[in-house]
Image: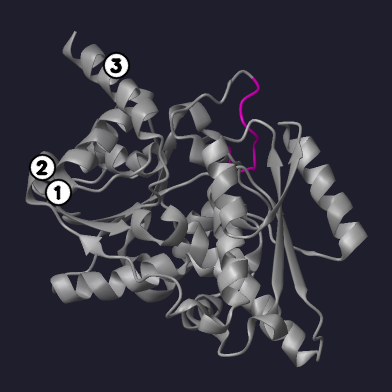
Amino acid sequence: MTSPYCITIDDVKTAAGRIAGVAHRTPVLTCSSLNGLSKGRHLFFKVEALQKTGSFKFRGALNAVKEELERRKKADNDTALHVLTHSSGNHAQALALAAKLAGGSATTGSTAASTNVQATIVMPSNTPTVKRNAVQDFGATIVMVEPTNKARREKAEEIRQNTGASFIHPSEDPRVIAGQGTVCLEMLEQVQELTDKPLDVVIIPVGGGGLASGNIITLRSVLGDKVKIVLAEPAKLDDAKRSFEAKELLPHDPSNNLDSVADGLKTTLGPNTWPIIRDKADDILTVTEDEILLATKLIWERLKICIEPSAGVGIAACLGEEFQAKYPTQEYSNVGIILCGGNVDIVKISKKIEEAVARQSA
Protein backbone atom coordinates (compact mmCIF):
# COMPACT_ATOMS: atom_id res chain seq x y z
CA MET A 1 0.00 0.00 0.00
CA THR A 2 1.29 3.45 -0.90
CA SER A 3 2.09 5.66 2.08
CA PRO A 4 0.19 8.95 2.31
CA TYR A 5 3.36 10.59 3.61
CA CYS A 6 6.64 11.53 1.97
CA ILE A 7 8.63 8.87 3.88
CA THR A 8 8.14 5.51 5.61
CA ILE A 9 9.99 3.74 8.40
CA ASP A 10 11.91 1.82 5.72
CA ASP A 11 13.30 5.14 4.47
CA VAL A 12 14.46 5.96 8.00
CA LYS A 13 16.12 2.57 8.40
CA THR A 14 17.83 2.93 5.04
CA ALA A 15 19.04 6.39 6.09
CA ALA A 16 20.43 4.91 9.32
CA GLY A 17 22.54 2.52 7.27
CA ARG A 18 23.74 5.27 4.96
CA ILE A 19 24.94 7.62 7.67
CA ALA A 20 26.35 4.97 10.03
CA GLY A 21 30.02 5.44 10.74
CA VAL A 22 30.00 9.06 9.58
CA ALA A 23 27.31 10.73 11.68
CA HIS A 24 27.81 10.38 15.42
CA ARG A 25 25.64 8.03 17.43
CA THR A 26 24.93 10.74 19.99
CA PRO A 27 24.50 9.83 23.66
CA VAL A 28 21.35 9.58 25.73
CA LEU A 29 21.98 11.17 29.13
CA THR A 30 20.05 11.17 32.39
CA CYS A 31 20.15 13.52 35.38
CA SER A 32 18.68 12.82 38.82
CA SER A 33 18.32 16.50 39.73
CA LEU A 34 16.34 17.20 36.56
CA ASN A 35 14.21 14.15 37.31
CA GLY A 36 13.42 15.74 40.67
CA LEU A 37 12.47 19.05 39.08
CA SER A 38 10.08 17.19 36.75
CA LYS A 39 8.15 15.73 39.70
CA GLY A 40 9.90 12.39 39.78
CA ARG A 41 9.82 11.51 36.12
CA HIS A 42 12.68 9.71 34.43
CA LEU A 43 14.03 12.01 31.72
CA PHE A 44 16.17 10.72 28.86
CA PHE A 45 18.00 13.40 26.86
CA LYS A 46 19.09 12.60 23.29
CA VAL A 47 22.00 15.01 22.88
CA GLU A 48 22.12 16.10 19.25
CA ALA A 49 24.15 19.10 20.38
CA LEU A 50 27.06 16.64 20.19
CA GLN A 51 26.36 15.72 16.56
CA LYS A 52 28.80 16.82 13.86
CA THR A 53 28.32 20.54 13.08
CA GLY A 54 26.50 20.83 16.41
CA SER A 55 22.98 19.74 15.46
CA PHE A 56 20.73 16.95 14.18
CA LYS A 57 20.79 18.65 10.77
CA PHE A 58 23.91 16.73 9.77
CA ARG A 59 21.94 13.47 9.68
CA GLY A 60 19.48 14.64 7.06
CA ALA A 61 22.04 16.48 4.98
CA LEU A 62 24.37 13.48 4.89
CA ASN A 63 21.57 11.09 3.98
CA ALA A 64 20.46 13.35 1.12
CA VAL A 65 23.96 13.76 -0.30
CA LYS A 66 24.79 10.05 -0.09
CA GLU A 67 21.45 9.05 -1.62
CA GLU A 68 22.11 11.44 -4.48
CA LEU A 69 25.52 9.85 -5.03
CA GLU A 70 23.93 6.37 -5.05
CA ARG A 71 21.32 7.47 -7.58
CA ARG A 72 23.94 8.93 -9.89
CA LYS A 73 26.09 5.80 -9.63
CA LYS A 74 23.14 3.63 -10.71
CA ALA A 75 22.63 5.96 -13.67
CA ASP A 76 26.36 5.75 -14.56
CA ASN A 77 26.60 9.49 -14.13
CA ASP A 78 30.25 10.13 -13.26
CA THR A 79 30.12 13.92 -13.36
CA ALA A 80 30.81 15.82 -10.16
CA LEU A 81 27.80 16.20 -7.88
CA HIS A 82 26.77 19.77 -7.08
CA VAL A 83 24.39 20.22 -4.13
CA LEU A 84 22.64 23.46 -3.30
CA THR A 85 20.54 24.92 -0.50
CA HIS A 86 19.55 28.19 1.14
CA SER A 87 20.15 28.50 4.86
CA SER A 88 21.54 30.90 7.42
CA GLY A 89 22.28 28.39 10.13
CA ASN A 90 22.57 24.73 11.03
CA HIS A 91 21.53 23.24 7.67
CA ALA A 92 24.11 25.37 5.86
CA GLN A 93 26.93 23.96 7.96
CA ALA A 94 25.48 20.45 7.83
CA LEU A 95 25.23 20.33 4.04
CA ALA A 96 28.67 21.84 3.60
CA LEU A 97 30.28 19.18 5.79
CA ALA A 98 28.12 16.39 4.40
CA ALA A 99 29.31 17.27 0.89
CA LYS A 100 32.91 17.30 2.03
CA LEU A 101 32.73 13.95 3.83
CA ALA A 102 30.48 12.11 1.39
CA GLY A 103 32.82 13.05 -1.43
CA GLY A 104 36.00 12.03 0.37
CA SER A 105 37.84 8.76 0.42
CA ALA A 106 37.44 8.43 4.18
CA THR A 107 33.72 7.80 3.86
CA THR A 108 33.24 6.26 0.44
CA GLY A 109 36.24 4.00 0.08
CA SER A 110 37.12 5.63 -3.24
CA THR A 111 39.18 8.61 -4.26
CA ALA A 112 37.84 12.06 -3.58
CA ALA A 113 38.25 12.94 -7.25
CA SER A 114 35.91 10.16 -8.41
CA THR A 115 33.14 11.23 -6.04
CA ASN A 116 33.72 14.95 -5.94
CA VAL A 117 30.85 16.83 -4.30
CA GLN A 118 30.56 20.60 -4.58
CA ALA A 119 28.23 22.53 -2.27
CA THR A 120 26.77 26.00 -2.77
CA ILE A 121 24.93 27.71 0.07
CA VAL A 122 22.75 30.78 -0.43
CA MET A 123 22.95 32.80 2.78
CA PRO A 124 21.37 36.11 3.85
CA SER A 125 23.70 39.07 4.21
CA ASN A 126 22.98 39.33 7.95
CA THR A 127 24.28 35.83 8.67
CA PRO A 128 26.77 36.00 11.59
CA THR A 129 30.39 35.87 10.49
CA VAL A 130 31.09 32.80 12.62
CA LYS A 131 28.49 30.82 10.66
CA ARG A 132 29.80 31.99 7.31
CA ASN A 133 33.31 31.05 8.33
CA ALA A 134 32.22 27.57 9.37
CA VAL A 135 30.53 26.95 6.01
CA GLN A 136 33.62 28.21 4.16
CA ASP A 137 35.91 26.06 6.29
CA PHE A 138 33.99 22.98 5.13
CA GLY A 139 34.74 23.94 1.52
CA ALA A 140 31.36 25.22 0.35
CA THR A 141 30.76 28.21 -1.90
CA ILE A 142 28.65 30.96 -0.31
CA VAL A 143 26.37 33.26 -2.28
CA MET A 144 25.11 36.22 -0.25
CA VAL A 145 21.66 37.75 -0.83
CA GLU A 146 19.34 40.22 0.84
CA PRO A 147 17.99 38.89 4.16
CA THR A 148 14.54 37.86 2.92
CA ASN A 149 13.08 34.41 2.27
CA LYS A 150 12.08 35.54 -1.22
CA ALA A 151 15.63 36.56 -2.11
CA ARG A 152 17.01 33.27 -0.83
CA ARG A 153 14.53 31.17 -2.79
CA GLU A 154 14.95 33.12 -6.00
CA LYS A 155 18.74 33.03 -5.94
CA ALA A 156 18.80 29.31 -5.18
CA GLU A 157 16.43 28.64 -8.07
CA GLU A 158 18.57 30.78 -10.39
CA ILE A 159 21.68 28.80 -9.45
CA ARG A 160 19.83 25.49 -9.86
CA GLN A 161 18.70 26.40 -13.36
CA ASN A 162 22.12 27.70 -14.40
CA THR A 163 24.19 24.85 -12.97
CA GLY A 164 21.90 21.84 -12.71
CA ALA A 165 22.70 21.57 -9.00
CA SER A 166 20.60 19.25 -6.84
CA PHE A 167 18.58 21.35 -4.40
CA ILE A 168 18.31 19.96 -0.87
CA HIS A 169 15.68 21.77 1.17
CA PRO A 170 16.47 22.21 4.90
CA SER A 171 13.25 20.58 6.13
CA GLU A 172 11.01 19.56 3.20
CA ASP A 173 13.32 17.18 1.29
CA PRO A 174 12.13 13.60 2.05
CA ARG A 175 15.75 12.41 2.24
CA VAL A 176 16.44 15.04 4.89
CA ILE A 177 13.30 14.08 6.83
CA ALA A 178 14.28 10.39 6.74
CA GLY A 179 17.76 11.22 7.99
CA GLN A 180 16.36 13.21 10.90
CA GLY A 181 14.16 10.24 11.81
CA THR A 182 17.27 8.29 12.79
CA VAL A 183 17.48 10.34 16.01
CA CYS A 184 14.66 8.41 17.69
CA LEU A 185 15.66 5.15 16.02
CA GLU A 186 18.87 5.40 18.02
CA MET A 187 17.23 6.84 21.13
CA LEU A 188 14.76 3.97 21.49
CA GLU A 189 17.61 1.44 21.35
CA GLN A 190 19.65 3.43 23.88
CA VAL A 191 16.75 3.88 26.32
CA GLN A 192 16.11 0.14 26.17
CA GLU A 193 19.66 -0.37 27.42
CA LEU A 194 18.99 1.95 30.38
CA THR A 195 15.54 0.80 31.51
CA ASP A 196 13.12 -2.06 30.96
CA LYS A 197 10.19 0.36 30.57
CA PRO A 198 9.57 2.06 27.20
CA LEU A 199 9.17 5.79 26.75
CA ASP A 200 5.72 7.12 27.61
CA VAL A 201 6.27 10.55 26.03
CA VAL A 202 8.77 12.01 23.56
CA ILE A 203 9.13 15.80 23.35
CA ILE A 204 10.53 17.23 20.09
CA PRO A 205 11.22 20.89 19.22
CA VAL A 206 9.44 21.97 16.05
CA GLY A 207 10.32 24.65 13.51
CA GLY A 208 10.28 23.62 9.85
CA GLY A 209 9.23 20.17 11.02
CA GLY A 210 11.94 17.98 9.51
CA LEU A 211 13.09 16.70 12.90
CA ALA A 212 9.55 16.36 14.21
CA SER A 213 8.00 14.63 11.21
CA GLY A 214 10.89 12.21 10.65
CA ASN A 215 10.85 11.09 14.25
CA ILE A 216 7.07 10.90 14.41
CA ILE A 217 7.28 8.31 11.62
CA THR A 218 9.90 6.40 13.62
CA LEU A 219 8.03 6.54 16.93
CA ARG A 220 4.65 5.55 15.50
CA SER A 221 6.23 2.69 13.56
CA VAL A 222 8.13 1.29 16.54
CA LEU A 223 5.87 2.12 19.51
CA GLY A 224 2.53 2.75 17.82
CA ASP A 225 -0.01 4.66 19.90
CA LYS A 226 1.62 3.63 23.18
CA VAL A 227 3.81 6.72 23.13
CA LYS A 228 2.59 10.30 23.34
CA ILE A 229 4.38 12.57 20.87
CA VAL A 230 4.50 16.17 22.07
CA LEU A 231 6.00 18.94 19.95
CA ALA A 232 7.29 22.11 21.57
CA GLU A 233 7.77 25.59 20.13
CA PRO A 234 8.20 29.16 21.35
CA ALA A 235 4.97 31.09 21.91
CA LYS A 236 6.49 33.78 19.67
CA LEU A 237 6.82 31.26 16.82
CA ASP A 238 3.54 29.39 17.21
CA ASP A 239 2.66 28.57 13.59
CA ALA A 240 2.73 24.81 14.27
CA LYS A 241 0.38 25.03 17.25
CA ARG A 242 -1.99 27.37 15.42
CA SER A 243 -2.00 25.06 12.40
CA PHE A 244 -2.55 21.99 14.59
CA GLU A 245 -5.53 23.58 16.34
CA ALA A 246 -7.03 24.93 13.11
CA LYS A 247 -6.35 21.66 11.26
CA GLU A 248 -4.93 23.62 8.34
CA LEU A 249 -1.44 24.81 7.47
CA LEU A 250 -1.00 28.40 8.60
CA PRO A 251 1.92 30.85 8.32
CA HIS A 252 3.31 32.88 11.17
CA ASP A 253 0.85 35.38 12.58
CA PRO A 254 1.45 38.64 10.64
CA SER A 255 1.65 40.54 13.93
CA ASN A 256 4.53 38.37 15.16
CA ASN A 257 7.97 39.96 14.76
CA LEU A 258 9.69 36.53 15.06
CA ASP A 259 12.24 37.70 17.62
CA SER A 260 12.38 34.53 19.70
CA VAL A 261 15.63 33.55 21.40
CA ALA A 262 15.04 30.11 19.83
CA ASP A 263 15.88 31.42 16.38
CA GLY A 264 16.51 27.93 15.01
CA LEU A 265 12.76 27.33 15.08
CA LYS A 266 11.67 30.27 12.91
CA THR A 267 10.97 28.19 9.80
CA THR A 268 7.34 27.24 9.21
CA LEU A 269 5.92 23.82 8.37
CA GLY A 270 5.53 22.82 4.73
CA PRO A 271 3.60 20.40 2.51
CA ASN A 272 5.73 17.37 3.40
CA THR A 273 6.17 17.91 7.14
CA TRP A 274 2.68 19.24 7.92
CA PRO A 275 0.57 16.15 7.04
CA ILE A 276 2.68 13.91 9.30
CA ILE A 277 2.42 16.34 12.20
CA ARG A 278 -1.28 16.97 11.58
CA ASP A 279 -2.16 13.28 11.57
CA LYS A 280 0.27 11.68 14.00
CA ALA A 281 1.39 14.15 16.69
CA ASP A 282 -0.58 14.13 19.95
CA ASP A 283 0.02 17.66 21.14
CA ILE A 284 1.89 20.90 20.54
CA LEU A 285 2.87 23.03 23.53
CA THR A 286 4.27 26.54 23.51
CA VAL A 287 6.64 28.11 26.01
CA THR A 288 7.63 31.67 26.85
CA GLU A 289 10.99 33.29 26.20
CA ASP A 290 11.93 33.27 29.87
CA GLU A 291 10.93 29.61 30.20
CA ILE A 292 13.24 28.79 27.29
CA LEU A 293 16.15 30.73 28.75
CA LEU A 294 15.79 29.27 32.24
CA ALA A 295 15.49 25.75 30.83
CA THR A 296 18.62 26.30 28.74
CA LYS A 297 20.40 27.43 31.90
CA LEU A 298 19.29 24.26 33.69
CA ILE A 299 20.76 22.03 30.98
CA TRP A 300 24.01 23.97 31.02
CA GLU A 301 24.26 23.65 34.80
CA ARG A 302 22.82 20.20 35.52
CA LEU A 303 23.54 18.15 32.40
CA LYS A 304 26.83 20.00 31.64
CA ILE A 305 25.88 20.29 27.95
CA CYS A 306 26.00 23.61 26.13
CA ILE A 307 22.74 23.57 24.18
CA GLU A 308 21.24 26.38 22.12
CA PRO A 309 17.88 27.88 23.20
CA SER A 310 16.06 26.02 20.42
CA ALA A 311 17.03 22.82 22.26
CA GLY A 312 15.91 24.34 25.56
CA VAL A 313 12.33 24.50 24.27
CA GLY A 314 11.79 20.78 24.94
CA ILE A 315 12.84 20.79 28.59
CA ALA A 316 10.95 24.06 29.09
CA ALA A 317 7.78 22.34 27.87
CA CYS A 318 8.42 19.31 30.09
CA LEU A 319 8.76 21.46 33.20
CA GLY A 320 5.79 23.68 32.33
CA GLU A 321 2.44 23.62 34.08
CA GLU A 322 0.51 22.56 30.98
CA PHE A 323 2.60 19.45 30.45
CA GLN A 324 2.41 18.57 34.15
CA ALA A 325 -1.38 18.83 34.07
CA LYS A 326 -1.94 16.94 30.82
CA TYR A 327 0.63 14.21 31.41
CA PRO A 328 0.71 13.28 35.12
CA THR A 329 3.80 11.45 36.36
CA GLN A 330 1.80 8.40 37.45
CA GLU A 331 0.86 7.64 33.84
CA TYR A 332 3.76 9.23 31.97
CA SER A 333 6.93 8.63 33.94
CA ASN A 334 9.50 7.94 31.19
CA VAL A 335 10.04 10.98 28.99
CA GLY A 336 12.46 11.33 26.07
CA ILE A 337 13.59 14.85 25.11
CA ILE A 338 15.58 15.69 22.00
CA LEU A 339 18.23 18.36 22.62
CA CYS A 340 18.39 19.33 18.96
CA GLY A 341 21.52 21.50 18.79
CA GLY A 342 24.33 23.38 20.47
CA ASN A 343 25.26 26.21 18.11
CA VAL A 344 24.95 29.17 20.42
CA ASP A 345 26.49 32.58 21.00
CA ILE A 346 27.35 31.92 24.64
CA VAL A 347 28.06 35.54 25.56
CA LYS A 348 24.84 36.83 24.02
CA ILE A 349 22.62 34.09 25.49
CA SER A 350 24.30 34.30 28.89
CA LYS A 351 23.28 37.95 29.10
CA LYS A 352 19.70 37.04 28.17
CA ILE A 353 19.68 34.28 30.79
CA GLU A 354 20.93 36.75 33.40
CA GLU A 355 18.05 39.07 32.53
CA ALA A 356 15.53 36.21 32.72
CA VAL A 357 16.85 35.20 36.16
CA ALA A 358 16.48 38.77 37.35
CA ARG A 359 12.87 38.90 36.12
CA GLN A 360 12.12 35.62 37.86
CA SER A 361 13.55 36.93 41.13
CA ALA A 362 11.75 40.28 40.99
| Residue nearest the viewer, comparing 64 with 162 | 162
Labels 2, 1: front one = 2
Residue 93 visible? The answer is yes
Q: Amino acid at mark 2?
A: Lys
Residue 169 located left or right of residue 44? right
Name the spot of residue 139 as percent of width and height, x first.
63, 60
Name the spot of residue 340 as percent of width and height, x first.
40, 52
* Marks 3/2: CA–CA distance: 26 Å
Labels 3, 1: front one = 3
In the picture of the structure, the residue carrying the numbered disc 3 is 355
Name the spot of residue 203 as percent of width and height, x first.
34, 51
Name the spot of residue 110 as percent of width and height, x first.
61, 90
Question: Image quarter for residue 246?
Answer: top right
* Residue furthest right as drawn: 162
| Residue nearest the viewer, comparing 195 with 72 | 72
Question: Image quarter for residue 323?
Answer: top left
In the picture of the structure, the residue carrying the numbered disc 1 is 329
Labels 3, 2: front one = 3
